[in-house]
Image (cartoon, rainbow, N blue to C red):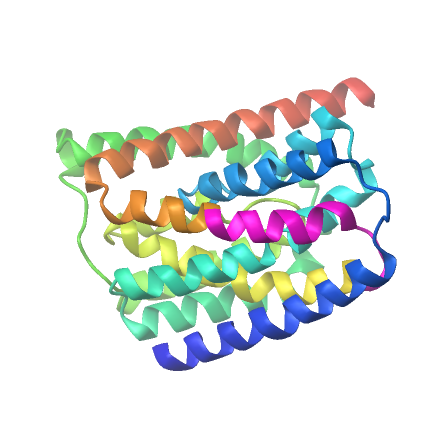
Amino acid sequence: MILAFRVITILFIIFYGAFLFKDVIKNGPKNESMLNKVLYGIMGFVLNILDTLGVGSNATQAAFFKFTKLSPDDELPGNGNVIFAIPVAVEFLLFLDIVEVEPITLITMIAASVLGAVVGAKIVCKLPINAIRGVLAVTLPFVAVVLVVKINGIGPFGIMGDATGLTGAKLIIGILVNFVLGALMTCGVGLYAPCMALCALLGMNLTVAFPIMMGSCAFLMPPASVEFIRNGRYNRGAAMIASITGVIGVFVAYYIVKSMPITALTYIVALVLIYMSASFIITLMKEKKNA
């Protein structure tokens, strides 16, 4: 089954890359400035290093384009999917090679996230998105504290788990929660940080979260990306450049994570959770101000 994942992902990269390249060549800007091209390249490289480390790309790419004013707001959802689809697929391929995950856990949790994106989004997207952001803004810092306490063996939490898969009730919880996370992904709420927290709290080795969260996004992003490409709702000037430099950034970060002690990785994940909480709070404050 792992081989099947690899084959499907490689085919996706080939066909999706050709589809994207064709659209950019046909409809892309002809007079993009060299400065813009350099900025796109740096953005792809840096943000995909952060993405591979677990920070995610939704909030960071939006911040980049807001700051540089290189994309209007209506292109931001498309940018988050189209520009990062190939690098995320490469992330998934790399982490399948270095992280041992029980196939049943990997397959069912990825399938749950995809099903959540297809089916659950119709339900979740009807919920007030700011209420969801508010809940995550409160709970993610709490999870960060629990992770730090666990890695240091403080109190009743003990030490971090080392399981490479889930069984029984824990597997059911993992499937159900990843279903919800897949639905939230289509509503603009990133999957990476909550998925890492989920895996850690269920007793899995923290590195196991990487192929699960990357695989979930690798299979979620293509259909969304295709629709954005067909409708031209993304930054064509950035797409090809940032996709290429993004893959380079993925390889750089891959070797960092590969050799990183689990304690250091846990502290990074805790910081990521706090960062995501802060980003949700900032978004809520901005929307309240503009209301």
Quadrant in which the N terminus is drawn: bottom left
- Residue at coordinates 28% horizontally, 66% vertically from top-left? 101
Quadrant in which the C terminus is drawn: top right
The stretch drawn in magenta includes residue 62: no
Q: Position of residue 185 (x, y in %)?
A: 60, 52
Q: Is residue 53 above or below residue 117?
A: above
On the picture, is 178 further left or further right than 230?
A: left
- Residue at coordinates 29% horizontally, 31% vertically from top-left? 267
On the picture, is 255 further left or further right than 4?
A: left
Is there any visible trace of residue 203 in the rendered image? yes
Q: Which residues are magenta?
A: 230-248
- Residue at coordinates 20% horizontally, 58% vertically from top-left? 163
Q: Is residue 174 above or below residue 7?
A: above
Q: Position of residue 233 (x, y in %)?
A: 82, 52
Q: Position of residue 104 (x, y in %)?
A: 33, 74
Q: Nearer the viewer, residue 159 or 271?
A: 271
- Residue at coordinates 21% horizontally, 42% vertically from top-left? 262
The stretch drawn in magenta includes residue 244: yes
Query: Image quadrant of residue 93?
Result: bottom left
